[in-house]
Image (cartoon, rainbow, N blue to C red):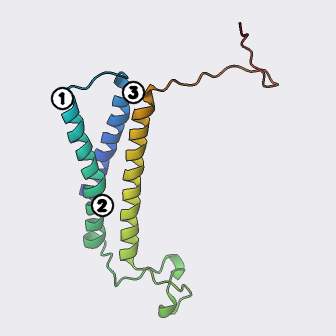
């Protein structure tokens, strides 16, 4: 549990660092060779965290400490998910290993979403912010042209 929590905290801190650095770095400034290498190492570290270490720690936690194996069947609260083969009403048998694997897919989805969001926000940081023109209650602009 400690390893998973530590990995998630480090990954979130890295994501926050990306957001803060993207706001600080001037648009159009050239990268030096050392800056490019440091950025590549940091990007590889973040990829390794989100796609390697965090899913591995989740699987290790679920298998070793919680005992989520394929032979343990999920019954849910008040046996709502109890399969019909065990006397329940659910036609689908859901094992704890399936829940563990769905958790891994969710972790990959979070990592991929953050990765795409960071790249898009980095590329769009040079775009000018749209200016809000004050309008009347009828929707006409208050600014006079000319």
Q: Is residue 131 left or right of residue 37?
A: right
Mark 3 or 2, nearer chain start: 3
How far apart, in angstroms, are the residues tagged by discs 3 and 1?
A: 21 Å
Q: Is residue 105 left or right of residue 80?
A: left
* Residue 74, quarter of picture: bottom left
- Residue behind mark 1: 33
Circle 2 or circle 1, nearest the eye: 1
How far apart, in angstroms, are the residues tagged by discs 2 and 1?
A: 32 Å
Report helix, strand or loop for mark 2: helix
In percent of the image, x 72 and y 10: which residue is there?
A: 145
How far apart, in angstroms, are the residues tagged by discs 3 and 2?
A: 30 Å
Name above or below for residue 136 compared with residue 120.
above
Residue 55 has which mark? 2
In the rendered image, the quadrant that contains the C terminus is top right
- Residue behind mark 3: 23
Residue extending furthest top?
A: 146
Q: Out of 66 and 115, give the one closest to the viewer.
A: 115
In percent of the image, x 20 and y 34: which residue is there?
A: 38
Residue 116 at x, y percent in the picture:
41, 45
Mark 2 or 1, nearer chain start: 1
Residue count near mark 2 (Cα–Cα under 10 Å), binned few <14, some 14–19, many ≥20: many
Residue 95 at x, y percent in the picture:
40, 79
């Amino acid at each position: 549990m400690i390893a998973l929590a530590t990995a998630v905290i480090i990954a979130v801190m890295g994501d926050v660092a990306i957001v803060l650095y993207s706001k600080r770095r001037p648009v159009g400034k050239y990268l030096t060779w050392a800056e490019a290498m440091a950025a590549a190492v940091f990007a590889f570290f973040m990829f390794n965290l989100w796609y390697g270490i965090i899913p591995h720690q989740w699987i290790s936690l679920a298998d070793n400490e919680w005992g989520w194996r394929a032979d343990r069947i999920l019954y849910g609260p008040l046996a709502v998910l109890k399969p019909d083969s065990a006397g329940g009403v659910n036609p689908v048998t859901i094992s704890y290993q399936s829940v563990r694997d769905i958790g891994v897919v969710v972790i990959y989805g979070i990592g991929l979403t953050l990765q795409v969001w960071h790249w898009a926000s980095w590329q769009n940081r040079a775009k000018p912010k749209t200016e809000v023109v004050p309008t009347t209650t009828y929707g006409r602009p208050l600014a006079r042209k000319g």
